[in-house]
Image (spheres, rainbow, N blue to C red):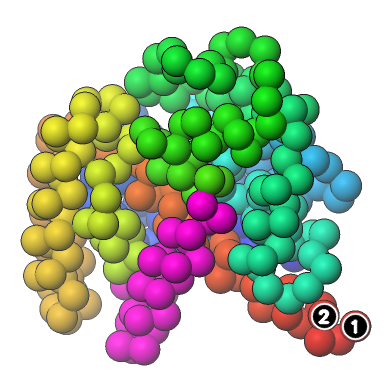
Amino acid sequence: MVAAAFVAACEAELDAPKPGNVHHFAPGHGMAARDFIASARAAAPHIAAPGASVGARILGAVEATWDAVGQNTNLGIILLCAPLAHAALGAGGDDLARETARVLAGLDVADAQAAFAAIMRANPAGLGAAPEHDVSGTAQTTLLEAMRAAAPRDRIGWQYAHGFEDIFGLGRDALQDARRRGHDAARATLDVYLTFLAAFPDSHIARKYGLDLAQAVQQEAAREAERIRFAPRDEAFAIALAFDRALKDRRVNPGTSADLTVAVLFADSVQPILASAHKNG
């Protein structure tokens, strides 16, 4: 069920016209929706592998993705979803946020080494060298501590350092608000994505092009999100696709915002599984 929830979250994210990112409405950055579907299906058994460590889930999923599509389509998604899956599979309670915090606190050096190997394998754009806990070297600390060191420059590292606060707070709130307003799944996904893109500079943009551009895109996203918020569905999608073309013309991909969106959808799918398992004993 966790593997199926992972694939479903990855596929659902592609149904929304996420500006600057890949989706069913338009390819981008040398990738198409089919690459992400193939990646999700290849990675899912490793994300949900019984008894695996978080690090093993990450490395196995990245290696399977490369065998399937030969490029980095989902490193951020994997880094976010592996701890969530681990929490769900080994949960002692029905609160996914609390269980995820427990998993993060238990990460060790072996998890860090596996994650370092996965990141080197994926070789994301703008990776460069880090002043502390560089992934090209041997891990000297836990994965949690390595992510805490990366947190000031990377929003995925920030999630590890702050108990996945954006997933269980900002993102979940946006999803629930969209549902209260009667939005369908694709429109709700777009709302979550734009919430992240407007809330803080996208790490992927900042890593590749610098903080100034990431902040400029954040400001653009805030304006477009305001236009989209109360627009009818077709109009909202038209505004989003115009923004999508503008970003892709500049070769700008808010990849971290998309990764966070998948994690929100995955957590949302896994939480009821957790609650049902504990309710039924």
Residue 4 visible, this orientation: no
- Whether tag 1 and tag 2 are in contact, CB under 8 A, the answer is yes
Per the image, label 1 sits on a secondary structure element best described as loop
Q: Is residue 133 left or right of residue 54?
A: left
The residue tagged 2 is 278
Answer whether residue 187 is magenta in the image. yes
Q: Is residue 52 visible?
A: yes
Percent position (x, y) of residue 222?
Answer: 15, 59
Q: What residue lies at 35% left-to-right and 81% top-to-bottom?
A: 177
**Residue 232, x across and y down, in percent:** 16, 81
Q: Which mark is residue 281?
A: 1
Q: Is residue 92 left or right of residue 136?
A: right
Name the chief secondary structure element in magenta.
Answer: helix
Q: Residue at x 71, y 63 (%)?
A: 99
Describe residue 175's horizontal placement relative to residue 248 as left or right: right
Q: CA distance from mark 1 to mark 2?
A: 5 Å
Q: Position of residue 136 (x, y in %)?
A: 57, 12
The magenta span reads: 162-190
Q: Secondary structure at mark 2?
A: helix
Which amino acid type corresponds to the residue marked 2 in the rendered image?
His
